[in-house]
Image (cartoon, rainbow, N blue to C red):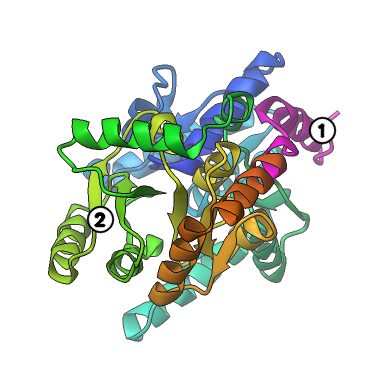
Amino acid sequence: MVVGRSTGGIGLHAVDLAGHLRALGDDVVLVTDELTAQRFDQPGALRWWPTRAGGLRGLVDGVRRLHRLARSSDVVHAHGHQAGLLAVVAATGTSTPVVVSQHNAVLRGAGPRAMVSRLASWVVQTAVARRAALVTGASSDLVDVARSHGARTARLAAVPSPRVPELVAAPLVDVRERRTGAEALLAARGIPASGALVLTISRIAPQKNLDVLVDAAAGLRVRTQWVVVGDGDTTLLAELRQRAARVDAPVHFVGAVGDPTAWLRAAEVFVLPSRWEARALVVQEAMAAGVPVVASDTGGLHDLVDGAGVLVPVGDAPGFAAAVDAVLADDERRGQLSQQGRERATSWDDGAATARQWREWYSALPGMT
């Protein structure tokens, strides 16, 4: 199992899948980098991810080690674009099938540098797709991209959040309990309680469109405190805080937390304004916790949320503000969305079922018996 630097959903999924496969009796070796191994408490992981500090020699040595491991393995399963490239290069010259799971879209920029980047990305994606025995996508648009790059076999592979079963099993929290929980969480961080708690769990990264979130919060009519849980780009975080102060938005960035359950059980609306997402784990968790979801209509979020939440065009700050206001102002609608999201969450496969599905796919790969 090969996964690059990740502090979010990709790393969480890879580690969870590895754990369930081991529970089924498989020998799974996780190859990753130091940050990912530490973030997800994987002391036994092989920290073979190439780094700039290692230089060209370090890269070559790492690929050689991974090549030897691939040769002695039944399957190499890589998660993400960079891990996919590393895996297909390392497995060259072996008969070991390579599986590549794509979790993110390659978002397009503008200008000459972006054009070069797009060309390089196209070459890499094509090489990986054609070399891999199987390419999976966490959303249907990623499957279409893999096919367009010449993947021999491409299919949709759901990525479940390991937190969903526990959230679904817990009793549903009513609005009064949520307000009480929110007051305690906010007070612990020196934030005054004021109206409903609106929650976003997200990396601080350009893809997440958090500037849209700040502008939406500034345009709310209903009294709220909007909390963003997550860490990431420190420069962007400083810019977002300045923006929130400038437009008088009730947005508070509280950093990363190990377990967001308390926040999910205190929130009255969950918002994710990303430019693109696949099957966002945090949205799954919000639905399982009975929190009404307002999200961008993009990528895999459409299938995940449509009919059980509110979808807003990407980048539409007034649209997000209006959607949040509408949910908070209508108790009946809020309760309906809470129930619909929770019911949908109960229908999803859990990690154990997902691992069993992966075992079937592995066993059907070329060269497997």
Callout 1 secondary element:
helix
Judged left or right of residue 355, residue 53 is: left
Give the spatial CA distance, label 1 vs label 2.
46 Å
Write down the residue under mark 1. Answer: 360
Q: Residue 366 colored magenta? A: yes
Quadrant location of residue 189? top left
Q: Residues within 10 Å of mark 1 (few under 14, many from 20)?
A: few
Residue drawn where x is 44% and y is 23% of the image: 45
Asked if residue 67 shows in the view, the reply is no
Residue 250 on image: x %, y %: 24, 57
Write down the residue under mark 2. Answer: 251
Does 182 appear above or below 203? above
Does 152 appear above or below 179? below
Tell which residue pokes out farthest to the bottom in this image: 111
The one nearer the camera, 315 or 90, is: 315
Extent of the magenta region: 344-369
Callout 2 secondary element:
strand
Asked if residue 357 shows in the view, the reply is yes
Residue type at the position of mark 1? Glu
Q: Quadrant of the C terminus?
A: top right
Residue 276 on image: x %, y %: 50, 64
| 1 vs 2, front mark | 2
Residue 65 on image: x %, y %: 46, 31
Q: Earlier in the sequence, mark 1 or mark 2?
A: 2
Residue type at the position of mark 2? Val
Residue 225 on image: x %, y %: 29, 51
The one nearer the camera, 137 or 1, is: 137
Residue drawn where x is 23% and y is 50% of the image: 252
Does 210 appear above or below 62? below
* Marks 1,2: beta carbons within 8 A: no
Residue drawn where x is 42% and y is 42% of the image: 267
